[in-house]
Image: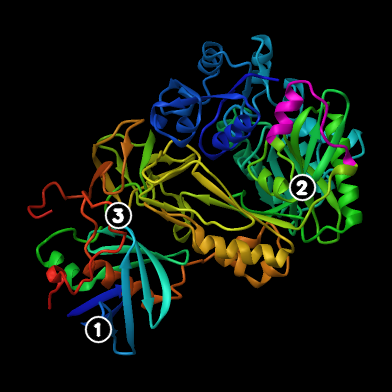
Amino acid sequence: MKYNLTLLEKTTPLAVSPTANGAWEMESPEKRLAVTGRRIDDTHLFLTIDGVGCNAFISDDGNAKQIMIDGVLYQVIDADAQARSTVSGAASPTLPRDATPPMPAVVVKIMVAVGQQVKAGDGLVVVSAMKMETTLTAPFDARVAGINVAVDDKVAPGDILVDLETAGEENAPEA
Amino acid sequence: MFKRILIANRGEIACRIMHTCREMGIETVAVYSEADETAAHVLAADRAVLVGAADPTASYLNQDRILAAARSAGAEAIHPGYGFLAENAAFAARCVEEGITFIGPPAEAIRDLGDKTVARRLMQDSGVPVIPGQLQAETDPAKLAAAAEEIGYPVLIKAAAGGGGKGMRIVHAPEALAEAAEAAGREAAAAFGNGSIYIEKYLPKTRHVEFQIMADRHGNCIHVLERECSIQRRHQKIIEETPSPALTPKLRAAMGEAAVRAARAAGYVNAGTVEFLLDPEGRFYFLEVNTRLQVEHPITEMVTGIDLVREQIRIAAGRPLSYAQEDIAGRGHAIECRIYAEDPACGFLPSPGIIRYLKSPQGPGIRIDAGIYAGAHVPVEYDPILAKLVVQAETREAAIARARRALASYVILGVRTPIAFLRDVLDHEAFRRGATYTDFIPEHLAAWTPLAPNPDAARAAFVADALMPKARPAATPGTGPSAPSPWQSLGGWRG
């Protein structure tokens, strides 16, 4: 069977085929590796790669797996599955269009009001996570069309805290 | 001795204090907020009292609620840990008024040492070297300019009530002074409710070296060696070690003696830390006194074998120090790595969430002070420290190797941690040769990104995880952890 796995923005094709005794061979354009695996628990796998032991700890995150080996966290993405889900219209990459927090946080201050004109870089909302405050700024010149949060609200990445409208957007049929 | 102590804190430090209490046969009372109902420190305590909402001002900083909890739970003493109310003179005074022992210094010492200009005057008067600069807060721009001229540029503007880098500005030339002073004053007023600032000489290349001090109520005061804490990000320490690679026995004796003099000048009782800046020529300057147990206290415990929390509790109960200065000797080398919930590849942004998986390192010379468990929630409201990895070995080189090894086997999934970053600090040639200055991270690791030393293993792990089914919820006991070979269950096959 074949995989296309992306690690640090590099996609590697892999051919995986069974060998004797529950082992398999993993072949990339550069090399061929003999692999065995044992599942210790849902997260923990013990592998041998060309005879050398390796503990890997894996958590799933959609099409990506977060894999920790020797204190280093690797994000490995199934490029084929990702291509499928993008075609089906799911989760398009986030554009820097929206005022969304970079981490789960609590709203500390709202710096704008509905109807206000803001310039790119103007502060919109201050959020706080773990004693560190971050100011979310306007990504472009815009008018504040709506404020979706209040002070003390808990917010997460992807939440749109402030709706922004560029000039003329409200009239544009295909905004 | 106390029968029951309330620990007015959370996380790893609350757990660490409870360990010692239990060893001393003292019952523990935890306090917790609504965000912490199942936090590690609540699970570790004999009793636990809900003190308020998640916001720290409603709970861990709420003096009324914490004192009421102590009364209702019958605690005779309160240990404040670090942060929260630990350096709050008013709280220490209220404990005394209510007949509860505050395990820490007297309120007056906290108050005096909390104001940096007062502390600088105290030190200067008792012959402890201070950084050249003002001994009074100043607001008049003309006087500030004159002082800066006399000290010589570059100068550092600091907040009198300061801490954590807030209200701090480096000024390289006279024309930038007025604006920087105004901004620093504003920032200090916002952060501490006190906009007082003062100016001191800016020392560009320094180490942060601090001395642990211990004083009892019987006039005994000793130092318990130094800690080097120069590896910092955002003015916050992330790796500490002892002994300092920069100290000779002679310099250690001089600085230790100055630290004890500083403690005596302030009328200090209990555990505290005198912080110094040390320049490359071996000149040292008083920085400040932290009037509490320090985050990095375990490295001192590792090399001296002294339980500092036990000593704190004994001192608070009126006992004399268990040790004289000549009893204090360090053995080998200790290093602490702080494990925060944060992303070092993304400006050290906090990373709250749920700990999905946790496996702590084991082996000789390793100590973990932690406030987490698998499944634990890491709330957004509090300091992001999860755990401290502390190692001890015979030499600095061996301690570095041990810390690297331990970090490599530390697994925390669910939140981001700086484990890979900490390893890269320990691996850095400048760290290895002991060139640890406070600008280490900006100078050497400013544009850090994680390396991927073993991509083959990562890809093999991805494939193996896809091929080998996960255990079913109702696994038969005694069948062992290994799942059937993927070649017996080909459900995962495709392509």
Identify the residue position indicated by label 3 in the image. Answer: B478
Quadrant (top left, top right, bottom left, bottom right) of the N terminus of chain B: top right
**Mark 1, secondary structure of its residue:** loop
Task: Say which chain tag 1 marks.
Answer: A
Q: Is residue A33 magenta?
A: no
The chain letter under disc 2 is B
Question: Is residue B311 rendered magenta in the image?
Answer: yes
The relative height of residue A77 versus residue A13 in the rendered view (above or below) is: above
Q: Residue furthest left?
A: A173
Tag 2 residue = B304
- Say which element carries label 2: helix
Mark 3, Cα crowd under 10 Å, few <14 / some 14-19 / many 20+, is: few
Scheme by which the image is coloured = rainbow
Which residue is at a point 67% across and 40% down the rendered structure image?
B294
Q: Do the residues indicated by labels 1 and 2 lie within the same chain of the protein? A: no
Q: Residue at x 84, y 40 (%)?
A: B259
Residue position for label 1 = A20
Q: Which residues are magenta?
A: B309-325
Q: CA distance from mark 1 to mark 2?
A: 55 Å
Left or right? Give the position of B112 relative to B384: right
Q: Image quadrant of residue A152?
A: top left
Q: Are marks 2 and 3 in contact (CB under 8 Å)?
A: no
Label 1: how many Cα within 10 Å (few below 14, some 14–19, many 20+): few
**Amino acid type, label 2:** Thr
The percent coordinates of residue B427 (x first, y second) are: 60, 69
Q: Is residue B60 above or below residue B438?
A: above
Q: Amino acid at mark 1?
A: Ala
